[in-house]
Image (spheres, rainbow, N blue to C red):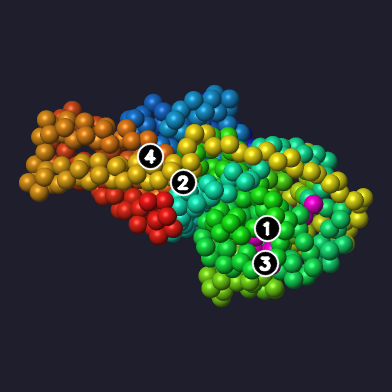
Amino acid sequence: MVYQIREQLSDSGHNVFIYEENETIVPLNSLYSPVKEAQRYLKKLSELNKQFIVFIGVGNGVLLDTLMQSKVFEKNVHFLFIEPFSEIKLSEKHLSCISKSNKLSFFYLKDFTSLIFAQFISKYISIPICIQTHPNYLKANQKTVRECLKIIHEGTETKQILNNTEMKFAVDWIVEPLLNIQHISKSINIKALQGKFKGERAVLIAAGPSLKEHMDFLEERQDSYHLFSVGSALRALLKSGIHPDYVLSVDASNLNYATHFEGLDYKGTLIYETMSNSNIQKHHQGSLVVSRALTDNVTSHFFKDIYPFPNAAPSVAIYTLQVIAYLGFSEVYLVGQDLALIGGAYYAEGVKHHSGMKDLKDELWVENNQGVQVGTTKALKIFLESFESLIKTLPESLKIYNLSKLGAKIEGTKYVSSNMIELTEPKKSIIFERNTIQPSIDKDLNVSIAEFLNKLDLLKIEVSEASKHLNRYIKIGLVSPDDMIKVVKRFRKVAKHQLLEDIILSRVTFMFDSIINKFAYFDDKGKYSSDDLLELVHELNRFYELVNTYINQLLADERLMKYK
């Protein structure tokens, strides 16, 4: 029997949701007094302070009402409610309370993903996390509670992967936008192409294992569909005699260029983000179309008007789908977008691999388009959830079809066999007007880049001086309130540097946010002891040391030496 949720009045007059499945009948709140039950429950949490608390189960909302009137609510940082049962509907009153409070969040389990939880970890990094299960939910259905916990666990792993990515590319994500400045003035701003392909059909070609079996499909439809290839699929396509109309790039690493682009004879249009490896743009033989990466604050110092897509793209396929939607296509067919290890393979046969993509193992399991579980990696699961999140933001008029029979099921797409897709009339020829992008500064770009680097150097000097000042207090192990006033005054002077927030703090976010949160949620005492102040000084000094290390790495990068 499938479970059902019904309602019943408690002795105190509150509606209570009742869970029923076979012989199991469990009220999700007390049938005597949900209020007293909530008060007893929160009393057990009274010692929690400055924590991020996750509640599995919201019940009839009495726990939420009682929480908002309690000391627990005052003393802690944020409360995330996850409701396993979508049949339980929140009242307008509760929805309003959640939307108006910056300390409350709510998700149904069906909408909750590891990527969402990773974003909460990012926001409240360094804040202790406490996970609580609403009374009686474990008695009702342990499986759904375990599913919540599984997603939370995967969220912590997702956050670690994102942190590792930030660390790996922290320098590239500043250097490559600087190197791309010379190519931007030769590029078309994608802003000028919005809606140009209204009513047309596109194929998004990724490099997953199923790409090989669709080569004939792509060859037959080159003249009737606009082909958009991710960079990793381009080499295999060209070998098969397929010349996509567009190739797309977002990856900053030189390995991306060497593996997927170097040595290719491709004269189609390259659509790239400003953090894409500059060698790709440098050696491209065709037209260039550019958009600004959402997290790239470097390019905007030189070009103000380059369009950024509203969703950051952790994979080039996600970027490609945003481009296709922005250009106005009515239909898009996904080829090779498997997001799973089919037969143990990450890439299709014929796609050039680098060492990091070999000998991968199943780390997680997802449902494929045949309703069967298929193995995938943690990184691919992140891409899957990001792809699904993006689809929810796109116009409903854009129809998305997935041709991968054995690849991961993607919510918001419809699986179709390539044999069922009919040939259509020839695609329209779209002519791009050259619209040279003008810099927002009236100086030679090379001179402007040199000045930008000089500003970073001045920031480093300012931070070094501030750190030396703090080390004096650390050495003697004593900080007075008057000393702290001087420390804060110097910090405010450092913080006025525009590049600190715009460039430095926007990169290795998890490290900076961790330190900042420790300040933001430091115990609110009436009077701080010298030990309290010394702890803050230590945290601030770690912040200064991190900034200094990062700037040193940037200024020492050999790719930038030509500007000095």
The CA span between labels 3 and 4 is 38 Å
Q: Which residue lies at the image location 35% right of the left edge and 53% below the top edge?
A: 555
- The answer to which of marks 4 and 2 sits earlier in the sequence is 2
- Is residue 229 highlighted in magenta? yes
- Looking at this view, name the residue that lies furthest to the bottom: 359
Callout 1: few (<14), some (14-19), or many (20+) C-alpha neighbours within 10 Å? Answer: some
Q: Give amino acid for label 1.
A: Gln
Q: Give amino acid for label 2.
A: Asn
Callout 3: few (<14), some (14-19), or many (20+) C-alpha neighbours within 10 Å? Answer: some
Q: Which residue lies at the image location 58% right of the left edge and 57% below the top edge?
A: 282
**Label 2–label 3 contact, CB within 8 A:** no
Task: Give the residue at mark 1.
Answer: 285
Task: Give the residue at mark 4.
Answer: 499
> Foreground mark, 3 or 4?
3
Secondary structure beneath label 3: loop
Q: Which residue lies at the image location 67% right of the left edge and 70% below the top edge?
A: 351
Label drawn at residue 84: none
Secondary structure beneath label 4: helix
> Foreground mark, 2 or 3?
2
**Label 3–label 4 contact, CB within 8 A:** no
Residue 450 appears in the figure: yes
The CA span between labels 4 and 2 is 18 Å
Give the residues drawn in magenta, as a range: 226-235
Task: Give the residue at mark 2.
Answer: 446
